Structure formats: structure tokens, C-alpha cells
Amino acid sequence: MVFSSSLLENAVNEFAKLPGIGKKTALRLVLHLIKQDANEVTYFSDTIAKMREEIKFCSRCHNISDTQLCNICSNPSRKQELICVVENIRDVIAIESTQQFNGLYHVLGGIISPLDGIGPEQLNLDSLIHRISKENTTEIIFALNPNIQGDTTVYYISKKLKGIPVKITTIARGIAFGGELEYADEMTLAKSISNRIPVEHYINDNN
Amino acid sequence: MVFSSSLLENAVNEFAKLPGIGKKTALRLVLHLIKQDANEVTYFSDTIAKMREEIKFCSRCHNISDTQLCNICSNPSRKQELICVVENIRDVIAIESTQQFNGLYHVLGGIISPLDGIGPEQLNLDSLIHRISKENTTEIIFALNPNIQGDTTVYYISKKLKGIPVKITTIARGIAFGGELEYADEMTLAKSISNRIPVEHYINDNN
């Protein structure tokens, strides 16, 4: 692309550095901003800059936070003895959006994946073990992605927790709501059969 | 989406205002920026803010510009008597990227489209007529999109220019390079036959 304005070119190049944004999309975004009110664009850029400067990670659960302790950890109405272990912040947002979980989180910041060179020492694991032994935790729920890396991580952490009197569970695997049996992979279908639940339980869940 | 951080939420909302960016994409972009160096994010936001504050439109051709006169208009090596009329800035960038055109531009800022409520008075038309009568223009090339709106605009402006001694042309319509005859629409195929060119001309063009 040949630009006749370096202001335009620089802005397009900055947007094109973002993941999944090519030059053409970047140009479309910048031309959109040019059409907006100058105050709105100032607000856009200020919001981004402020976010990056002021954002923190919760000292307890490693979730993204405006303050030293995130507002999930500092909410006294949440069950302090229940910890949901997730891979990243996106998973916290996904689970929070269901509005069905009322415990705390622990963000690992990754998942054990030897092929990608990520071992247990890269994860927020020590702080998890420290929390559990200090916070009267009664249950740990693993909400990791259902793949080899997720299962390896669950296995590794469970072994680490041996001896600590805490219940360890993982979220249910099964046929997704609205999914079709015949298109489910064999593994999922097999797990959904072996982990079958009583019908009265199922009916209560859906009402 | 439920966020535990208002800094994060505000930043996601700002990105999600951009065209074609949904909440999930916005979140992905913001989480990417959080992982970047703080200085890089400051540079990103400063570049966008500076662009919006300082960008100008060329007083002669209405192209986007860093200065009062854009660097195409102020380049003395470009043919000042040749004006290519385009709909918008994106078209200038597309034509400049071919590096085949050495004249000036005139950005209409839209196209006549009664259905969208855009009439000739919304376009940069007066300044075009003013330029032509003042600048010793010898040729106007219309490079508008090949549709009813484009053709209407060409027709309208051509009528306006009646009496002014200037050659009026439009870019060639035809089968696109690499395109296949059997998939071309009838209109394009018909035009490419009626506007056929001598073979010696064609061979020279491709060498």
C-alpha cells in the first residue's frame, strides 16, 4: 500500500500490528476513526493507554484487576472455600458470564505443554498450593480445556495436592447443549456415557 | 460478557465500537495489548490520537494529507494537467499502489446515490469544476466503481463539464487479469468486446 500521508500510514501500521488485523482492515478502522469526532478518538486512545498503564493482576488469584485484590476475591458474598482453576483470563470472563459460579478463581496463566516448552514452573502453581493450605479451601474445580494439555495439567496438580484435605473435581465433559449425538467425537460420547447423571438431577438442573 | 475489571471493560467497549469488531475480537485485541510492553501501547495510543488531531484534507484534491496541500498535489514531477476522479481515499491508495498513474486526483467524497440520499451537492463537485477551469486540465479520468451509482455520477459530471475543453475518459472495464471468460457477467463481457483493443497495443502493455 502506498500512502500519501505519514500520519495515516503510521496509524494503519499500528493497527496492523494487532493479531488478526491485516493492512486492509487496519485502513478501514483508521478511516472510520478519521470520520469520528476528535473527542471520541481522544477518548478511545486515552482509554487504551490508561488501561495498559493501570491494569494490575490480582495478588491472590492472578485475574486481571483494577486494584491489588480483584473484585471477585474481595467480594465477601462469594464462597471463599471454593476455587475454580482456569487457564487464562478469558476463561474467567466466560464462567462469570454464565452467572452460575459463586466461588473464587485461580488463573494458572497457561497450561502444561511440553511441546510448547511450558512446564509447571511457568504457571501460577506455587501460589495455588499456598492458597489452598492457607485459605481453608474445601474444593478445587478444574475448568481446563478438554485436551491432552488440560488433562496433563489436572493430573500434575492433583498429584501435587496429595495429602492436602481438599475435594478435587473437574467440570463435566459431555455432549454440548444443542449438539447432535451422531456428530460428537467418540471420546466425548464415551465420557458422557460413563459420567451419566440421574434423570431427576438433570430435570432439576434445567428448571 | 461479565468483566471483573472496569479498565478492561472500558477498553473492550472502545474497540468494539470499531466497524467489524465484535466483543470477542475486542477482548482478544485488548488482552494482546496487555501482554505488550507499556511503551508500545503508549506509542499505539499516541499514534492514533496524533493522527486524528493532525490529519488534514488537501485543499486542492480532498485527499487525506499531513499538510494543507497533499504530497501528490505538491509534487512538481506529476502531470498537473491530468486529474483522476475517485470516490474516496481508499481508491487513491489503490491506484497509487499500482505505481502506474502519474497525474493528480480529485476525491469526490462519495458517489451520487439517490437511494442513500446522496445527491451531487454532497460531493466535492464545485471544487472539481473550479480546478478544471483554472488549472489547464487537459484530461479527466473517471475511476469510479462500475455500478449504477458510478455511471450516474460519471454522466452527471460529464454534463456539468460540457463546454469546458477537456478530454473525459473512464478506466477500462473488462475481464479481470486471471479471470475466466465463462464466469464473467454478461455486461462485463459485452463491454470488453465492444471496447476491444488492437493486439499490438495489448502485447506492448504486457511487456
Image: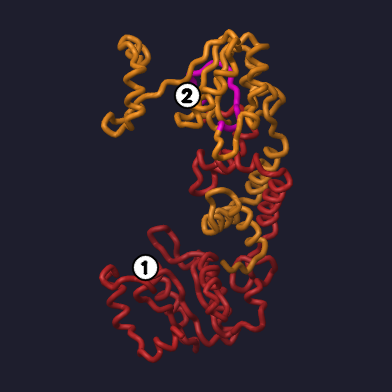
Chain colours: A orange, B red
Residue B204 to residue B20: above or below: below
Residue A54: x %, y % from top left: 72, 35
Read off the magenta span. Answer: A96-112
Amino acid identity at mark 1: Asn
Q: Which of marks 1 and 2 is in front?
A: 2
Tell me the kind of residue under disc 2. Thr
Q: Which mark is residue B147?
A: 1
- Residue A103 counted in the magenta span: yes
Q: Residue A98 carries which label?
A: 2
Identify which residue is drawn at 50% across, 32% down.
A149
Q: Does the magenta stretch include residue A196?
A: no
Separation of marks 1 and 2 at Cα, in angstroms:
47 Å
Instruction: Indicate left or right for B167 with B74 as reference.
Output: left
- On whether disc 1 and disc 2 are found on a single subunit, the reply is no
Q: Position of residue A158 (x, y in %)?
A: 55, 18
Where residue A15 appears, as percent x and y from the top left, is 60, 52
Residue for point 55% across, 41% down: B26
Horizontal side of B168 relative to A120 (left or right) equals left
**Front-lying residue, B142 or B11:** B11
Q: Could you say where residue A154 lies in the image, as x and y percent from the top left? A: 52, 23
Which subunit holds the residue at mark 2? A
Q: In which quarter of the image is residue A81?
A: top right
Whether residue B130 is situated above or below residue A68 in the rendered picture? below
Front residue (pair A48, A109) = A109
Q: Do the residues labelled 1 and 2 touch (CB within 8 Å)?
A: no
